[in-house]
Amino acid sequence: MRGADGEGDRGVAGWRVRSELPLPGAPPWTGDERAPDVTITEGAVPSALPGGVDAGPLLQVAPDGTARYEIASVAAYLVRDGREVVVDRRRGVADADVRVFLLGTVLAVLCYQRGIVPLHGSCIEVDGRAVAIVGPTGAGTSTLAAAARQAGLRVLGDEVTVLRPDGDRVLAVPTVPELALWPDVLASVGVAPGALGPRRAGIARGTLPVPDAFCAAPRPVAGVVHLGVVSDERSRAPRPLRGLAALAWLHANLHTPGYPAARVETAALMGRLPPLLAAVDHHVVLPWYPSWPGPAALLEAVVDQVGGGDD
Amino acid sequence: MFVWLASYPKSGNTWLRAALWSLLHDGATVDLDALADIGGTAAGRNVFERTLSVQSADLTADEVEDLRPVALTLRAARMRKRQAHKVHDAWRRAPNGRPLFPAEATAGAIYVVRDPRAVVPSWAHHARVSADAAIAFLADPTAALAADPGTGTIVLPERLTTWSRHVESWLDGPSEPPVVIRYEDMLADPARELRRAAAVMGWSVTAGALAGAVAATRFDALRRTEADQGFRERSIGTAAFFRRGEAGGWRDELTPAQVRRIEDDHAPVMRRLGYL
């Protein structure tokens, strides 16, 4: 088995990950000698979970929190206890295709199972602290992370932003040094077209490896910036969020909200959000409008809002 | 359950949504930011992803098409009341054979249609292309919105096909044909057409709310509202979303040769709708 001796173990979201499936994008594990936090193996996955609740046709959640996730043409994934993933891939499917969903929805489910809140978006480092940039697909969260890299900042991850409570603080933990980008934004963030690697057969969005700009250590979270589409391009001012409004935006930008919903775990989840609110200095909606200047200007607005020097 | 507000682009869909919004709010001035109160757009990417727990950009185009009716059916089952959702897609079946807008998710449908000779200048303005390019677009069987796979958008691709085929797909495709509302009739007798639309929504309508909604969505009123509030559906680089709101404006915007080309392209369907 690949990595059975621990040599090939990877570090993802602060966990020691031992995987039969190659995870070339993830950095090697450099932490302590602990047993693996998460193991990923290939094997049979049952077609349904006993007593499972369907969160749509792709995700099923059992009463004990075990999840079954399936992309019919790629693989079925069994996710248990926040510790174990079994991958049942369809015949002939490439590793890369299996990995896309492993490092997306499956990673988010692992977070929920461990009591950690996963947000949908990217995360960058500004003056030694982390800024989560979250929002719906197409809002530009990955593009902003690419703009940050172009501006010389480091990136903690993209797609799933993992925020882990740590005493009175909340830490953003690095995931994988890769950005998911559409080809049309490359020029605006200084990336040559050839640098974008394929993500999955048959799709146009690609993966940009950013090992040169990866912040591999956890960082305290300075702010959560929600990219919100606005109607009036005149209202460009970032809008600070407080209280229930901040809570509502966090909830709206959870990754894989179907998982907590299927567990009727919403109350417990909502219980985990207020400490997150309290421990993070800035919660901001950054209005986004298609006619705005490029991502660099948006990034400046982000850094202005939550950057260093104000704590 | 969904009520589909289906139309080819620039045919009065947003106008009707604004009028329904006002009607629902007792004839109030339209809040363009809040049109989603009566329902969103059927091709919304975020709601698709949250309903299915999947990143649409990591799926192939066929996988997305196959899953769209699944997501819509799930959402319909959770709705407590009818919601009017904007659709620019032609009615069709997904690659797996299932209708994109399945009967089990559907409470009703309204098809808004407009003379293609008027759609052309409006599309040319919105898409910032020439009238000739707009005429070619209306005749293009592969025409679609947000369909460039290399570009990220907050809506899923919507496939239009040609203007004629779009009309036929909605009039002849679904097992329950839609209520057809002509843009020109909305101009001529807005109260009557709005009452027909409200009936599909299952709303009872008071005379006061109806009069208010008609006044709030006269074109000068909508243009004022857009100037005050802005509107996110306006195209980049164009002055306004709500432009002229006329039935016969095309007569001074198109050359006779251009008019003939549109009529040649779409004569049978134009006749079917009383435009020729």
Image (tube, coloured by chain):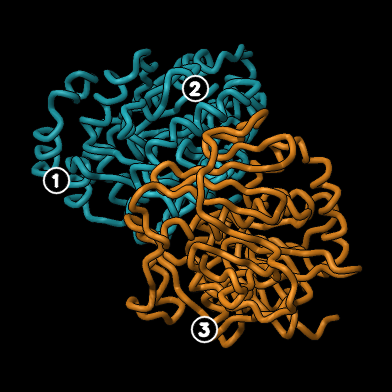
Chain colours: A orange, B cyan
**Cα distance between the residues tagged 3 and 1:** 49 Å
Q: Residues within 10 Å of mark 1 (few under 14, many from 20)?
A: few
Instruction: Please say if the residues under marks 3 and 1 sit with CB atoms less than 8 Å apart.
Output: no
Report the residue at 58% width, 41% height from top.
A68
Report the residue at 73% width, 62% height from top.
A239
Q: Quadrant of residue A145?
A: bottom right
Instruction: Identify residue type, mark 2.
Output: Ala
Q: Quadrant of residue A205?
A: bottom left
Is B269 placed above or below A271 here? above
Q: Residues within 10 Å of mark 3 (few under 14, many from 20)?
A: some
Is B188 placed above or below A108 here? above
Q: In terms of secondary structure, where does tag 3 sit? A: helix
Return the chain for callout 3.
Answer: A
Residue marked by disc 1: B255
Q: In terms of secondary structure, where does tag 2 sit? A: helix
Which one is nearer the viewer's eye here, A12 or A266? Answer: A12
Which one is nearer the viewer's eye here, B13 or A279? Answer: A279
Horizontal and vertical percent for residue A191?
41, 80
Q: Quadrant of residue A84?
A: bottom right
Numbered label attached to residue B37: none
Return the chain for callout 2.
Answer: B
Instruction: Please say if the residues under marks 3 and 2 sit with CB atoms less than 8 Å apart.
Output: no
Numbered label attached to residue A150: 3
The reply to whether label 1 and label 2 mark residues of one chain is: yes
**Position of residue B138 in the picture relative to residue B227 (left or right):** left
Residue marked by disc 2: B105
Disc 1 or 2, which lies upstream in sequence?
A: 2
How many marks on residues?
A: 3
**Position of residue A205 in the picture relative to residue A129 (left or right):** left
